[in-house]
Image: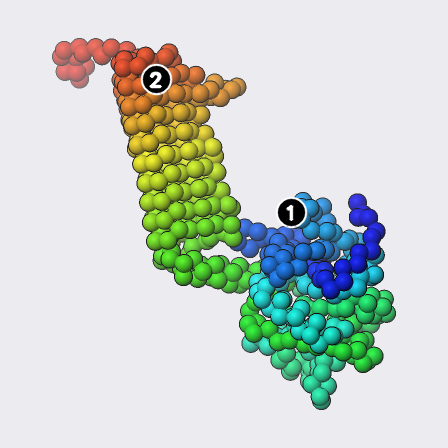
Amino acid sequence: MSLPREVIRVPGDWVAVILAAGQGKRMNSGLVKGLHALLGRPMVWHVVRAVREAGVERVILVVGYQEDRMRTALGTDVEYAVQKQQLGTGHALLQTRDRLEGIDGDILVVCGDTPLLDPQDLRDLMAMHRQERAAATILTALPDDPSGFGRVVRSAQGTVQAVVEERDASSAQRAIGEVNTGIYCFRAKDLFPALLRLGADNVQGEYYLTDVLSLLAREDRPLASLACPDPQTVANINDRVQLSHAAAFMQHRRLVQLARSGVTIWSFSSTFVGVDVTVGQDTVLLPMTFLEGECAVGRRCVIGPNVTVKNAVVGDDCQILQSVVEASRVDHGVTIGPFTHIRPGSHLRDGVKVGNFAELKNAFVDVGSKIPHHSYIGDAQLGKGVNIGAGAITVNYDGRKKHNTTIGDAAFIGCNSNLIAPVAVGPGAYVAAGSTVNQEVPPGALAVARSRQVNKPGWAGRHRE
Ligand code: UD1
Ligand code: CA
């Protein structure tokens, strides 16, 4: 599907182009590089976010390899340009020509494999570009190890002359410590004529975007540059070792933020907190805690060790130990675990206690109810102050359909009972231990649904003989 050809004039305005059409061969993956995740979100998503946080509204993503998967993952929040064959970064940017050639503004270009970007650096770069009235402005960096990056070649006067890829560089050029971050601003009017003149006379036989800089320099167009203060933020991900390092860096940065906001984290290296997670003051995250997806965890909770909470809301003063909570809501002062699985659609109200060893699914559990040991409660509504004895379960599935169980306030379900749904136990009722209940239990009644015990005096002695 091609987007409509349009020429948009946005004087004084910015458009961002993110280059993400490449396969990422060095990832050795069946998945396009841009969709490999950090903190639960695709690499490219982080780049889009940084650009938006820098204040650029209009974002064009250049896609190609696994274009459909990219569109599905990023949605309609961005525009797409398609690079059918991946012939290099210059060729990739050229694919935006039909939409951007006529604009009377500037283009921020960012590589889609640079997810650690600090939006402030992008803002500074754009400000410098405008201030210098430059045809192009490049963000450079001085990393500890420049290998893999293109090197920035400057004239005796210090102006940028060219960027030389490592593979094409002489040994003298390789000794240069200043590198190209792959982030630039271009005046649209100057960019497209230069892109059209690019050749592919280099080791990789590709149309390098970086050659635009030497073309413009040779024509004495004004070029500017800005050095990025923290080279770690412009790390680009070409293989999975770099992915792992970048994910750890991003995670560390997020955990530092949380710690500064009042969350205790025992182990930075074994705590995972996704980008769409909030954690309240004085909550303690113990090792091997994973807070994934969209989560909000309240104040003064103790979470972990060995806990996964995914797409869930957890209130204040909760304790979750060695357990999994998914797509559910947990109110205040709730205790979960150890070894408990709260499956999607559940809602535990204030003061509820679940576990050891319990599984809940699509269960509403009202204030103060307890499911303390070895239970399965699925498709059920429990009132207030209910007590579920050890091993009691709701039998919600008849092999074809799921059915509901309702248990009234203050009801008491004896150990090892089966409640065969659909069924209701009235408020204040008792179910005797070991019962298999398949009829409604009226409020306040005792249901005994098991065979009566028979004792045979002296039987054991005779049996042994
Ligand atoms: C590029 C720069 C290098 C810089 C480094 C910083 C060039 C020639 N080199 O190298 O100077 O130091 O980034 O991160 O620009 N892409 C396309 N279409 C293509 C080729 C690439 O969209 O045909 C996209 C990729 O998906 C990727 C980005 O462009 O997101 C950069 O490509 P990559 O191959 O990673 O470039 P580097 O070798 O890292
Ligand atoms: Ca790269």
Q: Look at the image and tell me in which quarter the C terminus lies.
A: top left
Q: Which residue is mark 2?
A: 425
170, 2: nearer the viewer: 2
Residue, disc 1:
73
Above or below 364: residue 78: below
The mark found on residue 279 in the picture is none
Label 1 neighbour load within 10 Å: few <14, some 14-19, many 20+: some
Figure quadrant of residue 192: bottom right
The three-letter amino acid code for the residue at tag 1 is Ala
- Point out the image quarter for the N terminus: top right
Q: Position of residue 215 (x, y in %)?
A: 81, 75
Q: Is residue 124 above or below residue 80?
A: below
Does residue 371 appear to the left or right of 177 in the view shown? left
What x and y, as percent, mark residue 35?
Answer: 63, 52
Q: Ligand 2 falls in which quarter?
A: bottom right
User: Residue at horizontal 67%, vertical 68%?
Assistant: 126
Left or right relative to 16: residue 324: left
Query: Which residue is painted at 33% across and 31% down in the image?
Result: 367
Which secondary structure, mark 1?
Answer: helix
Q: Tell me which residue sits at (48%, 50%) in the image.
A: 277
Determine the image quadrant of residue 374: top left
